[in-house]
Amino acid sequence: MNNLLALIKLNFLSAINPTNKKQSKLNKFLILFALLFLLGFSTFYAYSFVQVFKESNLTNYEFLIAFSILASNFFVVFLFFSSCSNVLYKSKDNDTLFSMPIKKSTIILSKLISILLLGYLYQFVFVVPFTIIYYIYNGFNFVSFICSLLGFFVEPIVPLCLSCLITCFSSFITKKIKYKNLFSTLALFIFFGLFMYFYMQINVFDLMQNSNSTSFIKYLPWINWFYISITQNNVLFLLYNILLACCLSVFIYYFVYVTFFKMCTELNSSNASKSKIHYKSKPIFVSLLSKESKKYFSSPMYVFNTLFAYLILLGVSIYFAVDKSLIYNLREIMPINSITLSIVIITAFSFLLSTANISAVSISIERQNFSVLKSLPLSFSQIVWSKITFAFLVGLPFIFVSSIIFTISYNISFWLFLMILGFSLFFNLTLCMLGIAMNICFPNLTTQNDTVLVKQSLSSFLSVLIPLIFVMLATVIYFYVNISLIYYFLIILSILIFIFFALLYFIIFVANKKLQKIN
């Protein structure tokens, strides 16, 4: 029992991953700040739903519960799918744990519980604010509260079990494929693409006019049972959820227990390439870009978490090109001309681009190889700009194609198309420079776990949080400022240009000194 608790604590605290006491304190402060910020944003979002309901003379506050459970499940499933394989089978600390006098059951339970604890943290941000707002406006009920409290701890178990099962089968199927990392990543993208398509089929305006507005969750039994137990004070459906979670937990535990050692051995073994090696002279910068490409695509966790935002951007563009009802409905509510629509598109693009940053861990992902890279006859500026350029080039086709789709779909003029494309590319370049600056300031070359490095390192955390706060504040402040949208957009662009030159100064004059100190 002591070993189990110690391993759970160790795995969960690795999410903070302090490298020294000062950085540990900074990590804790930033995590607390991010949690409060997300809670505040989620509460504001729930309150906005209520205001929309009131203006539309609707009292269907149950929609808050259905939406929060579905949204939390989406993010929890996203976390589990991107973590299960790496934490269970591909974790770098497995060799150390196997050599210690610890039972296999203890190792497996500690890993599963650690993933589940992170799921609770993700779920907390979405479910709790929406549930509180629901009770404030719909009235408090003790039975409903008990169901929501117990259901909160039961709800992520089913997604965890399904994610473990699917990732295990996916890893088993792709273990003998030459490009298994690429294949696994594409499979996850397809799954989440279908999930996002299902999620975006929820049309807010149709739901408001339909009395059965929560029918979209009936296809997911564990979500529907949780929803019914809260809104209808039905303990029986809560018991259904508990029973399903218990059955799946027992099955998944024994399934992982039986396959654990075999999967760990097979997935971590590397087959030497039998193909001939051909050497070809290339320019130094092209060789560095090629190295960045190989390093990037060699880690499914790295690809999945950074490329996902670009795929969502492309998927959203295609969706709104096919289904124009939302834009047309907005035009009926408020006057939206081509310039206003273009700025709205730019804001949406900026928000999505802020959610992932390739360059944020491009130095840390080198690990011990970074010392070798520094010893080569290369300047630090070549190393830094190759990482920035590669990150920028990855997002370039997605931004370009998405801009074209919106331009053609909504008859946007060529000059406005250039504005959308130019601002989006400039914003993405600034993000790439911000990511490399954060990674230079907060490098981590010791963590062997890609999940911790890509999802939970300080540089990755700041590179996502800072631009998200920038976009959200710029959007919220606009509604409290009596100024033309075009002038406000120019002010935001001026601020972004200032940030760009500040980052450029840091990379040219400060980065070299900091890179020399990185070991």
Image (cartoon, rainbow, N blue to C red):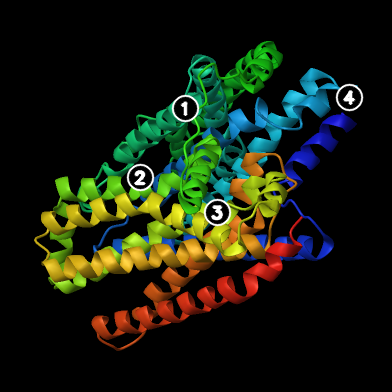
Residue at (85, 37) in percent of width and height: 6
Question: Which quarter of the rendered picture does the C terminus lie within?
Answer: bottom right
Q: Is residue 331 found left or right of 314 in the rendered image?
A: left
Residue at (57, 57) in percent of width and height: 383
The answer to whether 29 is drawn above or below residue 12 in the figure is: below
Q: Is residue 90 found left or right of 414 in the rendered image?
A: right
Mark 4 crowdedness (10 Å alpha carbons): few <14, some 14-19, many ≥20: few
| Dot 4 amino acid type | Met
The answer to whether 300 is drawn above or below residue 177 in the figure is: below
Question: Which quarter of the rendered picture does the N terminus lie within?
Answer: top right
Position of residue 50 measured from the top left corner of the image (x, y, whole percent): 37, 62
Secondary structure at badge 3 equals: helix
Instruction: Quote the CA–CA distance across marks 2 and 4.
Output: 42 Å
In the picture, the disc for residue 100 is 4
Q: Which of the two discs, 1 and 2, labels the residue nearer the N terminus?
A: 1
Residue on which disc 3 sits: 125
Q: Which of the two discs, 4 and 1, labels the residue nearer the N terminus?
A: 4
Q: Is residue 262 found left or right of 47 in the rendered image?
A: right
Residue on which disc 2 sits: 311
Give the mark count.
Answer: 4
Instruction: Quote the CA–CA distance across marks 3 and 2.
Output: 24 Å
Marks 3/4 in contact by CB < 8 Å: the verdict is no
Mark 1 crowdedness (10 Å alpha carbons): few <14, some 14-19, many ≥20: many
